[in-house]
Image: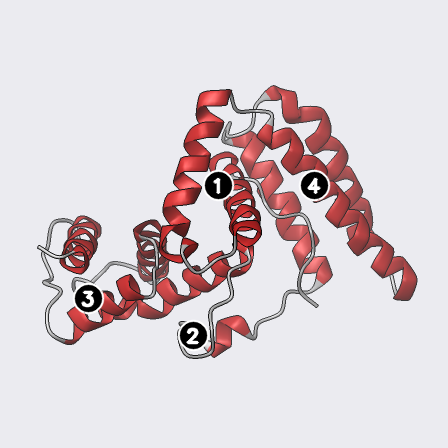
Amino acid sequence: MTEVDGYCRQVETYLCRKNDGHLIRIVGPSFERVSGWAQHGIPLKLVFRGIDRYFERYYGKGPRRRPVRIDFCDADVLDVFDEWRRAVGIVGSRESRVESRKSTTDSRESLPGHLERVVMRLTQARANGSIGADFDGLVDRVAGELAAARAARLRGAERQALIDRLTGLDAELLQAARGAFDEPTRASLVREAEEELAAFRSSMAPPAFEAARGAAVDRLVRERLKLPTVAFTHD
C-alpha cells in the first residue's frame, strides 16, 4: 500500500465512523479528490476537522436521510486547511496552493461581532473546564475589557487603539496558556506541530520553519484549552 493509499484508507475509516458504520468507499473521482489532499500536504487531522465541520452543519439541518460522501466535505476540508496555513504562516505558490471557497475566504467579521464571539468562547472555556482556576483572574480581566469595548462606539484612532490592545491581550492569554502545560506535554505539542508541517518542511528555510512550528504549537495550545483568538485580524 502506498502512502497515498494509506491516507485515503484512514479518511475512509474516519468517514465510516461519522456515518455510524455505513461504509462509503473512496474510489474513482472521490479517490482522486482525497489523493489531491494528500499530495498538497493536508494533514489528516485537518481533513478530519473538515469532515466534522460538514457533519455539524448536516446534523443542524435535522435527522439525516442518507450517508455522507467524502465529496460533500471537500469545501470544508479546504477551508480548514486554508485557515491552518494562514495561522502558521504557510503560503503556497500560485500553482500549488489549494483554493478554498470564495464565499468563506471573502467573508469578513465585524469588530463588535468578534468581541462578542471571543467573550462567549472564553465563558464556554471556563464553563466546560478546559481552562483551570489559575486562568480566572486573567479571563475576568480580558472579558471585562472586551465587554467594555463592545459597549463603546469607537472610530478612527480609538478603534485602532482597541485593535492594538486586542493583540496585546491575545499575546498575554497565550503566554499564560503555554505555562499551563508541563514539559512532557509541551514536547508532545512540538512533535505534533512538526508532524503537521512535515509535508512542507523541505521547501522552507530554517527560520521560516521555526516560525511556522512556533505558530503551529500556539494553535495547538489554543485548541487544547479551547481558547479563542483575541486579536482582530479582519476588517
Residue found 13% across the figure and 57% down from its top: 2
Most foreground residue, 17 or 166: 166
Please say if 176 is above or below 232.
above
What's the CA distance linking mark 3 and mark 2?
A: 20 Å
Q: Quadrant of residue 11?
A: bottom left
Distance from disc 2 to disc 1, alpha carbons, whole Å, reads 23 Å
Position in image of residue 6 (x %, y %): 15, 53
Neighbourhood count class around disc 4 (C-alpha, 10 Å): few under 14, some 14–19, many 20 upward: some
Q: Which residue position holds label 1?
A: 220
198 lies above or below 69: above
Q: Residues within 10 Å of mark 1 (few under 14, many from 20)?
A: some
86 left or right, relative to 29: right
Residue 171: mark: 4
Kind of residue sitting beneath label 1:
Leu
Instruction: Determine whether the residue tagged by mark 1 lies in a helix, strand or loop.
Output: helix
Q: Residues within 10 Å of mark 3 (few under 14, many from 20)?
A: some
Q: Nearer the viewer, residue 212 or 59?
A: 212
